Every structure is written in C-alpha cells, then in structure tokens.
Amino acid sequence: MLKKILTCFSLMLVVLCAAAGTVSARAAELTGIEAFDNEESVRIEISYGGGKLDLSDVATEIKSGILFVDMDNTLPGRVSRVSGTKIQSGARDVIEKISANRTQERHTRIQIHLRGKITAPDVKVSVEPANRSEKKSARVVIDISTGGADNWTGFDGGGRIVVIDPGHGGSDAGAIGPSGVTEKSVSLAVSLKAQKLLTEAGYHVVMTRTTDIDVAAPGVPDGVELQARVDKAPPNADLFISVHCNAFSNSHANGMETFHAPGAIRGERLARLLNEELEKLGGLNNRGVKAARFYVMTHSKCPASLIELGFITNYREERLLASGDYQQKLAQAITNAVNRYFSQGGSD
Ligand SMILES: [Zn+2]
C-alpha cells in the first residue's frame, strides 16, 4: 500500500513538473549498472546521483537483439567504463554485455546486448528512490521478463510480411474428427494465435481469412478458392504459410508433417524450420519434410510451406488440436520457425 501511495505521489510530481515545464538544474551522474536474476525477470539497476530523474527521462527500444536505454538529463560517469557495469552470473544467460556512452549533451545511451532476442512488451521500467536501509542509491530499474524459454527465441520481424493462410473455412469444413472437431476451426484458431505472436514480434501479418468464411465464395472450384488465398499475399510478401490438419480413413494414422513445392530451395528451408519447431513440441510423430504440388505453394511468389499440424481423424490428436493450450504452442512453434528463417539469413 505504501508503495502504491509513493508511486502515486511520484506520478503526481512528474505531472506537476511537466506542467511547470521545469528542467532539473543538474544532470544526474550514472554511478553503476548491475544486472541480476530476479526470479521471473532479469533486473537491471542503473544507479545515479547528483540529479533527479523521472520516467519521462528514460526511453527503451529493442532492435536487433539490443535493448537501448536512452536517458535524458544524465552524464554517463562511471558506467562508460567496463568497471562500472556488473552482470551477475544469474543474468549471464540473458545478457551478453552492457555498454554506455554519451550520445548528446546530457544524454546517455546504454546498450544491453541480449543473448536471446525479445520483444518490447517484455520490458518494464521504473524509477526507484534511494533506499538507505538497503544501501542503494536512486535507481532506474529495468525488468526484462523471461517468462519461459520461448520468449528468448524471438526476433525483431522488422516489418517483414508474413502471410498466414488458415486452411479451409466457410462452406468447406476440411477434415472432421471423430468427435466433430473441424479442420477449419483448428486452422483458424492456430493461425489467429500465430498472427498475434508474429505481430508482437514485429512482423506485418496478412491473413487470408480471420473468420469462418470461404475466401473466394462458397461452392467455387478449388482452384478459384485457392487462387483467392494466394492473391491475398501482397507482391512484396516475404513468406506464405498455410495451416492444415491431416486426415486419413484409418484413425491410427498420426503425426505432423510440413511441405514445400518441389525444387523450392527457400520453401524447403521454411518447411524444415517449421518441422523442427513442431517436433520440439514433442508428443507427435514426425512424418518429415516433404515436397508436394499443393496449389498455394506452387502459385505463391514468395517462399511457401503448408503444414499439417496433426491428424484430426486420430482420437488423441483431435483432442490435442482442439485444446487452446496446444494451439498456443503450435502458434509459438510457427513464430519460432519464422524467426529462425529470418535470423539465419533467409531474407534474400
Ligand atoms: Zn486441409
């Protein structure tokens, strides 16, 4: 409660200062940076003295695996030297190195090189007053949430365009499982979750559909419907991923597999990365990476893959495919594969 009141109070101060248009007379001098493991997050404390900072002095941005912390009204002081920075062992698997330098008059830029790459929503900034009993000076505190290993495989999408095609829809249910789960509903649910994750990771996601519809029109020939999906991709699209579930008359058939057009080198690479990420989820038989002449792959102008998430005609896999938790994992696997595709020089 006391903390809440203090936070309110400092917020009011910020508002009052902003309203009065005051600029603090003295720049704060940075005296040390320490990074350490703080259970669910890695915490970075930037200590300072001699001036006063508030939240409006601090801006953060993540680009290409570096967290930039720009601090107004500051002098880099001791932190511009290696000795001014300490990364404790618990934070070393997240942070590779930290450097700081003066970029302008009264302006310091701190670069925190991350081992994995994360996205902006995972960073929280606060300003803490000096704490005598803990022998701590005033600090800017940055928490980078690690929230599970998956967050650390992220990559800044840099606005690259990824087309996600939830298979079937509208009048075409696709395959139907023994308890009535439809392929069109699974493909849409997984695709929407992937859209969210990819968007958060900095991609521009184009969906061929976001609701239960035929993309062309109900009852048109397959080629017309599939071409309508291909046409949803803008000319400068970077990837096309079509999401499906498998089906077979024998309910014992099981597993996942990914496809690319024959001879499509980049499509094959995409299909392989998707396959590897789906395999990491465990639990499903891996039927491999295969070449096939599926319409959306042979007609896409960008690297394309069609993935079969599992057999909806298999009792166990139908249940998995219908589960929100598993759908989220599948969406994360797709996102990881896309990140890897671009982080390993596949953007040509
Ligand atoms: Zn299908």
Image: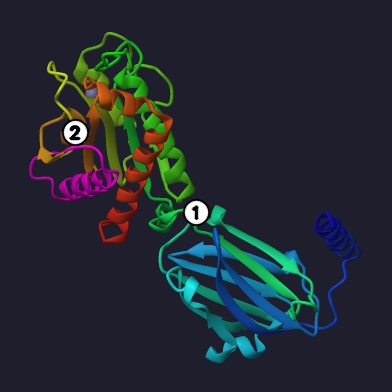
Mark before the other along the chain sequence, 2 or 1: 1
Nearer to me, 108 or 144: 144
Q: Is residue 227 visible?
A: no
Q: Is residue 162 visible?
A: yes
Stretch in magenta: 260-285
Q: Residue farthest to the top?
A: 219
Q: Main secondary structure of the magenta part?
A: helix
Residue drawn at x 62%, y 66% as measured from the top left: 142
Quadrant of residue 36 in the image?
Answer: bottom right
Amino acid of disc 1 = Gly
Callout 2 crowding tier (Cα within 10 Å): few <14, some 14–19, many ≥20? many
| Residue 147 x/y as whole percent | 50, 53
Assign the C terminus to one quadrant of the image.
bottom left
Asked if residue 305 lies left or right of residue 118, the reply is left
Residue drawn at x 12%, y 18% as measured from the top left: 250
| Residue of label 1 | 147
Amino acid of disc 2 = Gly
The reply to whether callout 2 and callout 1 are in contact (CB within 8 Å) is no
| Residue of label 2 | 255
Nearer to me, 66 or 186: 186
Q: Which mark is residue 161?
A: none
